Structure formats: structure tokens, C-alpha cells
């Protein structure tokens, strides 16, 4: 069955979300149009507003509506400790654990030469500048324990080897092949507190 072009366009648009296949996109579209047009209007307005207002923090690259995000400007945070993560979802996961009081650097991905993602694309040059120019005492590598996450961590270890900064890796209470946003808070808290210095 063919729907009208506007419905087909909405179905295709919803399929860009992770885990949403053709059937889920159909169900969501029909639900919004049949039962919740007000919710659909609210969703469209909120999505449009977020796309227009949210950008990256100048210091840590996390999502924010400000020039420098709330975490980077919070005087209660330890600005001498930077936790390096792959995504904003990882920041949220660590923050929900309540175990970390430093600041972050969000790579917005990981090294993946096959996909054309090198050090420049994930901002490793900017991170290196921060370590050199600011009073950074420790860099905690909290990249995901995947092949790409590990490669990114080892690249950073090599890059920062001569800068005199302590580099540690979160403990692997996080399952190998897992991603931080899906790990429970107590496991993340244990991983952060059990981090070890990288030789």
C-alpha cells in the first residue's frame, strides 16, 4: 500500500533514528497522525528548536546552547582532570553515576580510518592544545571498550606521552564490546573509581 507523499516522507524521516526499522516507523507515523496530532506538533517544534539552538561547547565539544557549557563553567568541578569520552550520551551516563567531578572532552566519535575519521575529525589536536596550555593533571580515557575505542585510547596515550600529564584508563567493569550509554550507574561508578594509570 502506498501512502501519500507527506506520510511516506515522515516514515522515511523516522527511520533515521537508531533501532527504528520500517514497521516501527509506520507505527509511529500512524500513531502520531491518528491519535496524537498535538504531540506531533510538539515533537516537530521541539526538534526544530533543538536543531537550531544546540551546538558544541567551545571547550569540551559537548552539546549546549551556550558558548561554553554548564559543566565547563561550574566552579565546583575539578578543571585539572579531563575525562575523554566518545559521545554526549557517555557524558550523561557518567554524570548519572555521580562518581566524577572533573570536566570532559567529547570526541564525537572514534578513530576509524576505514570511515575516513582521523585525529582531526574527532578533535584530538584541540585536546592536545588544552593539555599543553592548561593546568591539566590527569586525563581519564573513557572511550568505549571496542576495537575503535581502544585504538583511539592508544593513539591518545602516544600523543600525550611526553606532556607530563597522568593518563589513566577507566577500569573495565564495562563489558568488552559494550557502550557506556547502556551500562548501569553502579558499574560506571566502579569503573571510574578503579581506573589505572597507563604505562
Image (cartoon, grey):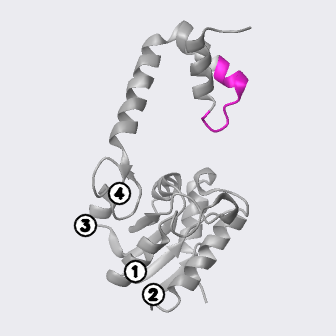
Closer to the chain start, of discs 1 and 4, is: 4
Kindly identify the residue that appears in the image at 40 percent across and 84 percent down: 137
Image-quadrant location for residue 169: bottom right
Q: Left or right: 175 with respect to 199?
A: right
- The residues bearing labels 3 and 2 have C-alpha atoms spaced at a distance of 22 Å
Foreground mark, 3 or 1, reads: 1
The foreground one among 132 and 136 is 132
Q: Residues within 10 Å of mark 2 (few under 14, many from 20)?
A: some
- The residues bearing labels 1 and 2 have C-alpha atoms spaced at a distance of 8 Å
Q: Residue furthest front?
A: 116
Q: Which mark is residue 131?
A: 1
- The residues bearing labels 1 and 4 have C-alpha atoms spaced at a distance of 17 Å
- The residues bearing labels 4 and 3 have C-alpha atoms spaced at a distance of 16 Å
Q: Are marks 3 and 1 in contact (CB under 8 Å)?
A: no
Q: Mark 3 highlights which residue?
A: 75
Image-quadrant location for residue 44: top left
Q: Mark 4 highlights which residue?
A: 57
Closer to the chain start, of discs 4 and 3, is: 4
Quadrant of the drawing holding the C terminus: bottom right
Quadrant of the drawing holding the N terminus: top right
Q: Mark 2 highlights which residue?
A: 165
| Residue 183 x %, y % | 62, 54
Which SS class for mark 3?
loop
Closer to the chain start, of discs 4 and 2, is: 4
Kindly identify the residue that appears in the image at 62 percent across and 17 percent down: 8
Which SS class for mark 1?
helix
Kindly identify the residue that appears in the image at 33 percent across and 61 percent down: 58
Q: Residues within 10 Å of mark 4 (few under 14, many from 20)?
A: many
Q: Are marks 1 and 4 in contact (CB under 8 Å)?
A: no
Q: Is residue 20 magenta?
A: yes
Image-quadrant location for residue 3: top right
Amino acid at each position: 500500500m502506498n501512502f501519500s507523499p507527506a506520510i511516506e516522507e515522515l516514515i522515511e524521516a523516522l527511520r533515521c533514528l537508531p533501532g527504528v526499522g520500517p514497521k516501527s516507523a509506520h507505527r509511529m507515523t500512524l500513531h502520531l497522525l491518528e491519535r496524537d496530532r498535538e504531540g506531533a506538533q510538539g515533537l516537530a517544534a521541539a526538534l526544530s528548536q533543538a536543531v537550531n539552538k544546540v551546538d558544541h561547547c567551545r571547550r569540551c565539544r559537548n552539546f549546549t546552547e551556550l558558548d561554553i557549557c554548564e559543566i565547563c563553567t561550574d566552579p565546583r568541578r575539578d578543571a585539572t582532570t579531563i575525562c575523554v569520552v566518545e559521545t554526549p550520551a557517555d557524558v550523561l551516563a557518567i554524570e548519572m553515576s555521580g562518581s566524577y567531578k572533573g570536566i570532559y572532552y567529547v570526541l564525537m566519535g572514534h578513530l576509524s580510518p576505514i570511515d575516513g575519521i582521523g585525529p582531526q575529525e574527532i578533535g584530538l589536536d584541540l585536546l592536545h592544545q588544552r593539555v599543553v596550555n592548561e593546568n591539566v593533571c590527569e586525563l581519564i580515557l573513557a572511550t568505549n571498550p571496542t576495537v575503535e575505542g581502544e585504538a583511539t585510547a592508544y593513539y591518545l596515550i602516544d600523543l600525550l606521552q611526553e606532556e607530563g600529564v597522568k593518563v589513566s584508563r577507566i577500569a573495565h567493569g564495562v563489558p568488552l564490546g559494550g557502550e557506556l550509554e547502556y551500562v548501569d550507574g553502579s558499574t560506571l561508578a566502579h569503573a571510574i573509581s578503579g581506573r589505572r594509570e597507563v604505562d
